[in-house]
Image: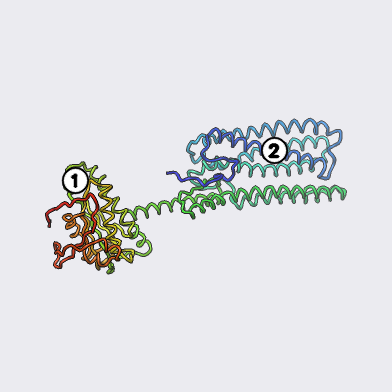
Amino acid sequence: MQPSNVPSAPLGSWLLGSTDESPRRRRVRVQALLTAPLLVTNLIGSALAVVLIGVVVPGPSIMRSEFAWINFIAVPIFTGCVFVVGLLWGTTRLIHDLRWATDNVPPTPENQRAALRGPWRLTRVQAILWTVALATFTTMYGIVDANTIPKVLFTIAFSGITTCAFCYLLSEFALRPIAARALESGTPRKSAVLGITGRTILVWMLGSGVPVTGLMLIAIFSFIRPASGQALAIAILVIGGITLCVGLGLTYINIRSAAAPIRSVRRGMEQVTRGDLSAHVVVYDGTELGLLQTGFNRMAEGLRERERIRDLFGRHVGHEVAANAMRQNPELGGEERDVSVLFVDVIGSTTIASTNTPTAVVALLNRFFDVIVDEVDGHGGFVNKFEGDAALAIFGAPNRIDDHAGSALAAARQIQIRLCAEVPEINAGIGVASGIAVAGNVGARERFEYTVIGDPVNEAARLSEVAKTVPGNLAASGRAVAAADDSEADQWQITDSITLRGRLEETELAIPREPAEGLVSTPVPPTD
């Protein structure tokens, strides 16, 4: 069964949708998230370059009439053609190459690497476009006035680098659904993306290092070509303001990218804490945070496997025995305990087997044992073993019960009532005995089981044979009735004193004062 996803934004943002949406919807969503932010970012970068060249950076003015054809014809046309067409071409080609992810095709190792390198590919396209713009406009302005070359070169490079930084972080966000599909087959050995350290250094370098370097270059060029104090002040104020805004924006995006996987793991941990082991987080980060997401999923899978094993272990040996085995290292041997034993044996099992198919017999016995297990568990005991068509239940071991005899007697009466009502096809003899027995692990070091050995076990088995001949098919030893509290002991009466098969001492025979309605005594000859 596929574990349920962590609620609310499995990919870290509602903008990214869910992992189970249709391929077409996912393709449209990713295309829109790539195109719109990158288009806006490039337009802002272009506007920033124009402002820096025209107003901020000291140097020869480009607002002179000889630059008019560049400023009002070449720049708009080139920007519109190169950036818009190039941007759409880059995103469309990338989505086409990653179509396997939006069409729910299992990824190959090549597909996985291509998906994780998607942000770099798109950023490389933007870098090429800005490099073309840098070469083109530097040449154009330089032809008219060579003194404008440093100014144009710096401003376009500064704007292009900043735009590419936002391009990488935003495309990494937009491609999370693709990365999630790629990482379903596991994290690649060689990372195709920046790690947390590399991403943080990139943000610092582009948000602080490049702008500060620009200010230093302006200061250096002011020595070569002196600028007025007002021009330098304007340059420092504007570039400083841009540095604050760009640095804040890059830092915010970086923090959100790092926090989203951590939040998904935190929500998964909250599910596990509440006992919901189906917790599962979508792995969409290729950095160390993606390894954290993968590690959580492996941990949750291990917990589910452990719970399945514990449940199976408990079903096979009893939940009480399983709990004791996990609390302490089980060893061969045992201890003397005062316990009560309930033994149930089907009457006429040979006839039932000969008149029904094996499948029908198994189904009938399962209904029969369902009642026994339910009542024994409800009265604080545990079914130690099933022996063909018989069952052995113990009260007082491994868990101690204050009134184990009363619990065993009450369970026996309730079992007989329910068998009469719910499994009328089967009659069973039930015997209950109490006394000192050895409870512990019996077998070999490599294979053992928890059981109870002693006189009460043998006595209960023999009483179940006698119970087949008495009204109500239910018999208990006088010692078990005497050990029970008064409220339960009053439900029983001593009717005889007999010597059970294989025993030397007589046993006081007790039966319920009011046998379950509908039960008929089924006398059977004694067998050895």
The three-letter amino acid code for the residue at tag 1 is Ile
Observer-nearest residue: 300 or 169?
300
| Disc 2 + disc 1, Cβ < 8 Å | no
Query: How far from the left and from the top, in percent, is residue 376?
Result: 30, 57
Q: Using the image, tell me which numbered label, if any, was put on residue 36.
A: none
Looking at the image, residue 173 lies above or below residue 492: above
The three-letter amino acid code for the residue at tag 2 is Val
Q: Is residue 394 visible?
A: yes
Task: Using the rendered view, name the quadrant where residue 429 is placed.
Answer: bottom left
Disc 2 versus disc 1: nearer the observer: 1
Which residue: 69% across, 47% down?
249
Task: Using the rendered view, name the quadrant where residue 57 is placed.
Answer: top right
Q: Secondary structure at mark 1?
A: helix
* Colour scheme employed for the rendering of this structure: rainbow
Q: Using the image, tell me which numbered label, if any, was put on residue 352.
A: 1
Q: Which residue is mark 2?
A: 40
Figure quadrant of the N terminus? top left
Figure quadrant of the C terminus? bottom left
Which residue: 18% across, 62% down?
495
Observer-nearest residue: 480 or 279?
480
Observer-nearest residue: 468 or 66?
468
Horizontal relation, residue 99 to residue 159: left or right: left
Q: Secondary structure at mark 2?
A: helix
Q: Is residue 388 visible?
A: no
Query: How far from the left and from the top, in percent, is residue 473?
Result: 20, 54
